[in-house]
Image: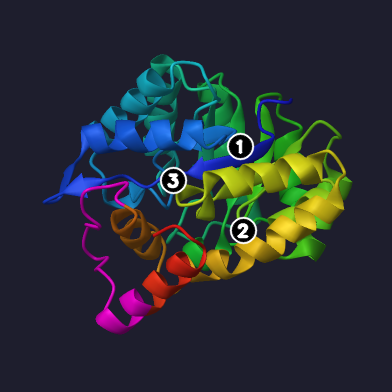
Amino acid sequence: MNTFRGAFVAIVTPMIDGKIDEQGLKDLIEFQIAGGTHGIVPCGTTGESATMSHEEHHLVVELTIKTVNGRVPVLAGTGSNSTSETIELTRHAKEAGADGALVITPYYNKPSQEGLYQHFKAVAEAVDIPIILYNVPSRTSVNMLPETVARCAAIKNIVGIKEATGSLAQISEVIRVCPDDFAVMSGDDPTCMATVAIGGTGVISVTSNVEPKDMAQMLDAALAGDFAKARELHYKLFPLMQAMFYDTNPVPAKASLAMMGKIKTDDVRLPMVGLNDAIRDKLRQAISAYGLV
């Protein structure tokens, strides 16, 4: 179960004039791997998966797997608010060679806890690939409770969860009620070190987009039990983590990467829009203070 450990990046999808910038994505993956990122997560929330066509989704997953070429695990975002669509995307990720699938709780529909369980059970039974559940109530308006997570964890290929509530109480309960080899990854950068301290295995990070090296080193230190070093890196990174949420994710991450010269444009797709001037100035100050520009 060591595949899903450390700092995985929820990678942005570079775009030019609304089209996916394939070379830009390849370059970004190389930047991540050079920085020591432990894994790549294409087509997550940060990758703007909600506005991608199936063809684009397939393209980004395939291109990521091909570019990574086995150097680090690829955990493909395959979730949707439709179970049949989730199965289709998950099946594609397996065929493309992904190491696992990150499957979000269905958004907008607001399923019951039983509905959530049946959704994940259906996906897990349809596609034999390691599945990481993804709980992010701030985005989906549904919170998958620890007892539901534990029910899902009993299904053999459901191997972990990305817990993005930011609640250490909920994460503690998930860890307490799930098997020892169940990977609990934080989906919330400011609490990811603390999540490891209470038994988590890592983070799927937005901040890693702009600072893969320090995020990876912080997680390495925390997983090794060196909390003095991990804490030092946490407080170094903390203002940067906050800056990544000056506006809705991934708008600040893309703007930062463009300022850093890592992507050609900070284009996001409607209904997302770029930063206003005041926030852009504040973001530039934050990444400049960190030494990124």
* Amino acid tagged 2: Asp
**Where are the magenta residues, as a range?**
261-281
Query: Which residue is depicted at the point 71% across and 24% down?
Result: 156
Please report contact status of discs 1 and 3: CB closer than 8 Å, yes or no: no
Instruction: Judge left or right: residue 277 versus residue 222.
Output: left
Q: Earlier in the sequence, mark 1 or mark 3?
A: 3
Question: Residue extending furthest left?
Answer: 17
| The disc label shown at residue 189, or none | 2
Residue 44: assigned label: 3
Q: Quadrant of the N terminus?
A: top right
Residue 256 screen position, x and y as percent: 37, 60
Q: Nearer the viewer, mark 2 or mark 3?
A: 2
Residue 101 image offset from top left, x and y in percent: 52, 31
Task: Based on the picture, tell me whether residue 242 belongs to the magenta stretch.
Answer: no
Q: Does 96 sit above or below residue 123? A: above
Q: Foreground mark, 2 or 1?
A: 2
Callout 1: few (<14), some (14-19), or many (20+) C-alpha neighbours within 10 Å?
many
Q: Which mark is residue 197?
A: none
Q: CA distance from mark 1 to mark 3?
A: 12 Å
Q: Which numbered disc, 2 or 3, marks the residue that appears first in the sequence?
A: 3
Asked if one can make out residue 218 in the rendered structure from this viewpoint, the answer is yes
Residue 166 vertical placement versus 178 (above, below): below
**Amino acid of disc 1:** Ile
Mark 3 neighbour class, 10 Å CA radius: few under 14, some 14 to 19, many 20 or more: many
User: For the point 37% across and 22% down, which residue is it?
Assistant: 67
Q: Using a 10 Å C-alpha cutoff, classify the residue at mark 2 as few (fewer than 14 neighbours), some (14 to 19) or many (20 or more).
A: many
Provide the secondary structure element on which disc 1 rests: strand
Is label 1 or label 3 in front? 3
